[in-house]
Image (cartoon, helix red, strand yellow):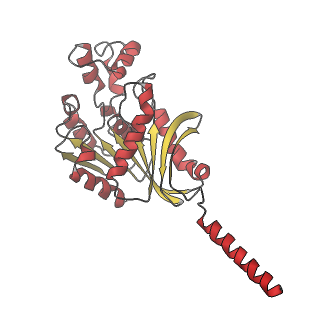
Amino acid sequence: MKLFTAVVLLFFLSCKKDKMANQSDPNTSAYRITKPISYNNVNVSVIIDKPAGNEFDVLITYHGTVQSDSDILPAAETTLSQFKNILNRQNMMIVSVAHPQLNILFGDNILQAEAALLWVKNKASTELGITTKKIFLAGHSQGGYLVTRLNTMHKTNGVIANAPGPLNLVYRCQLEENGQAPASYPCYNLRNVYGTTVANSNAYYQRSLLNFTNGFKSDILFVQGLDDMAIQLYSWPTFKQDVNNCSNCQTRQFVEIPGGHTAIFQSQTAKAEFNNFINSR
């Protein structure tokens, strides 16, 4: 009888152990969630795409310009998926930032962009129950503008900017004032505060990416499609020259390829350079 009882007990313990081993630990499971975060009293939502495991390098992505507030989260989701599709690593966590745009002056969303970076650096491990290692930034269009500016503020393991802009808000907004380009929220909001580009060109220039070509704290890769819009390519040679002339920047790399505004997501050359950049750091 005692032998029978011992056998039954061992069987029960074995089954319980197997059951526990098969249960997913929420901290090691893969998931994609939308999470409101806060850092230094600045609030922003992020979409987190976490692979299985609990220790990761992190890619923080930033989306381009949208036309309404309802488009911000979908843009962050799309940008996450676009960068994930060209990333050749399956073990990297991606955090896509749903930074605001429409009810603020262009460039002021650097506060939310920065808050997301600092949250990943200093709070993500605790709040998510994981360990973060290397941190990279990647942005498309206005997202490229944000990651370039962030590179003048904080050190990371590397930054990738695809078709960053607007490069020159004086030029862009003046075209709109003259009826040579469609109206846009950034220029409309700036004009309401500063007046026209003729009346106050310096205020527009201060927020242009041409004003942020020095002091890069981390290596940065710029990707630009040479069939992009004329409004982008007009200032691209000046921007590239100013960045190359920087005397207090980390390594700068330019990849210029055939293709439009989203060339990094279509070009095999750009994809290879993107992955080489991340994997070599």
Look at the image and tell me whether residue 154 can be seen.
no
Asked if residue 53 is positioned above or below residue 63 in the image, the reply reads below
x and y percent of residue 128 in the render?
58, 51
x and y percent of residue 236 in the render?
22, 36
Asked if residue 25 is positioned above or below residue 177 in the image, the reply reads below
Numbered marks: total = 0
Look at the image and tell me whether residue 51 can be seen.
yes
Q: Nearer the viewer, residue 209 or 22?
A: 22
Asked if residue 273 is positioned above or below residue 17 in the image, the reply reads above
Say which quarter of the image contains residue 228.
top left
Q: Nearer the viewer, residue 183 or 90?
A: 90
Report the residue at 18% width, 46% height from top. Answer: 257
Q: Quadrant of the N terminus?
A: bottom right
Report the residue at 52% width, 49% height from top. Answer: 121
Report the residue at 36% width, 27% height from top. Answer: 206
Q: Nearer the viewer, residue 3 or 270?
A: 3
Left or right: 64 as drawn, with respect to 4: left
Left or right: 241 as drawn, with respect to 135: left
Report the residue at 47% width, 56% height from top. Answer: 51
x and y percent of residue 183 in the render?
29, 17
Q: Quadrant of the C terminus?
A: bottom left
x and y percent of residue 104 in the render?
45, 23
Say which quarter of the image contains residue 28.
bottom right
Q: Nearer the viewer, residue 78 or 244?
A: 78
